[in-house]
Amino acid sequence: MLSAGECIEHEPALKATSRKIAGGVLVPDAEVGDCNKFGRALGDILVEKLGARIKYGVKVLRLVQGQNRVEALETSQGLLEAELFVLATGTMTGKFLGARFEGKMPITGVKGISVTFPAGPVAPNCSVADTAKKIIMLGLGDRVRVTGYGIFSDKTDIRQQHVRLLIDKARALMPNAANFDQPQEIWAGLRPTTPNDLPMIERAGYQNLYVNAGHGSLGWTLALGSAEILLDKIMIEFGRDLPPEN
Ligand SMILES: Cc1cc2nc3c(=O)[nH]c(=O)nc-3n(C[C@H](O)[C@H](O)[C@H](O)COP(=O)(O)OP(=O)(O)OC[C@H]3O[C@@H](n4cnc5c(N)ncnc54)[C@H](O)[C@@H]3O)c2cc1C
């Protein structure tokens, strides 16, 4: 637990704040990162080292079902056959999960918005949550990002008034952190959220169909652990040997 003074000592970007700081909670091992960079780099590793093929811009239209198995995916680019399928389609997952899957939960999209700016003279070193204003601000090298909002929606449209409010809150929290007049990127995404806020990571009604979806506001944090849990289940239930370590 930190006093207001200790918060500023720890994060000098808060020195010029117009917010009244009551105190703070420091999470020493919290980290920040660029999830887009992470995703692209992971994709490269899968392609280059493991021979994966990634098909962008292909829409899955329906699962082609057999007796107990999914035989193929009908996609916008024709049929795609495989031995095993994993549904990781975020808020759209419910569309493909049939009544045969007893663990099925509805997934609701909770829209969030992020705005990224060029860093200013006193950019933050860590990630700071202003819990009263419900925003998070963080430094990403030569950029500063603010995120906020929890809007029930399945669309990623962005209202200008929401962006303006987010920028005002960011400026109030850390006035010298960024060039707030020149946002570089304005982005909206959906947090795929289940009623109990737990993801579905399991076999989904068919012998060869698995689901990995519904990670809410923590999908990136939970991504690698979820994949490992799913892989363990597949290895046990589907009866395949573990792939080589690398
Ligand atoms: C503003 C904001 C800040 C966030 N901050 C954090 C954070 O700091 N840490 C953290 O861990 N998480 C954070 N999250 C949450 C995180 O982004 C989500 O939990 C995560 O993206 C969920 O991943 P997913 O792959 O399950 O779903 P998604 O990211 O929604 O991906 C699903 C994919 O499936 C595709 N798809 C859907 N239907 C079809 C179809 N029919 N055919 C083909 N493709 C289809 C979609 O195009 C999409 O690419 C944040 C979210 C937001 C909005």
Image (tube, rainbow, N blue to C red):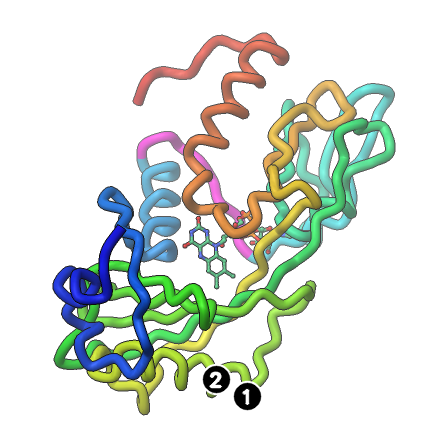
Is 54 covered by the magenta stretch? yes
Residue 125: image location, x then y, percent = 18, 62
Q: Position of residue 180 (x, y in %)?
A: 31, 86
**Residues packed near mark 2 inside 10 Å, few (<14), some (14 to 19) or many (20 plus):** few
Point out the stretch of residues depicted in magenta: 49-56
One can see residue 7 in this view: yes
Apparent side of residue 60 relative to residue 6 in the rendered image (left or right): right
Residue placed most toward the observer, 149 or 76: 149
User: Which element is circle 2 on?
Assistant: helix
Q: State whether residue 61 is above or below residue 121.
A: above
Quadrant into which the C terminus falls: top left
Pinpoint residue 241: horizontal percent, then vertical percent.
48, 8
Q: Residue at x 82, y 19 (%)?
A: 68
- In the displayed structure, 214 sits above or below 3; it is above
Above or below: residue 161 compared with residue 228: below
Q: Which amino acid, mark 1? A: Gln
Per the image, the residue denoted by label 2 is: 165
Residue 161 marker = 1
Question: How far apart are the alpha carbons under marks 1 and 2?
Answer: 6 Å
Instruction: Indicate the secondary structure of the residue bearing disc 1.
Output: helix
Q: Quadrant of residue 79?
A: top right
Q: Residue at x 67, y 38 (%)?
A: 80
> Residue sitting at 40 percent across and 75 percent down?
115
Amino acid type, residue under disc 2 in the picture: Leu
Q: Nearer the viewer, residue 125 or 241?
A: 125
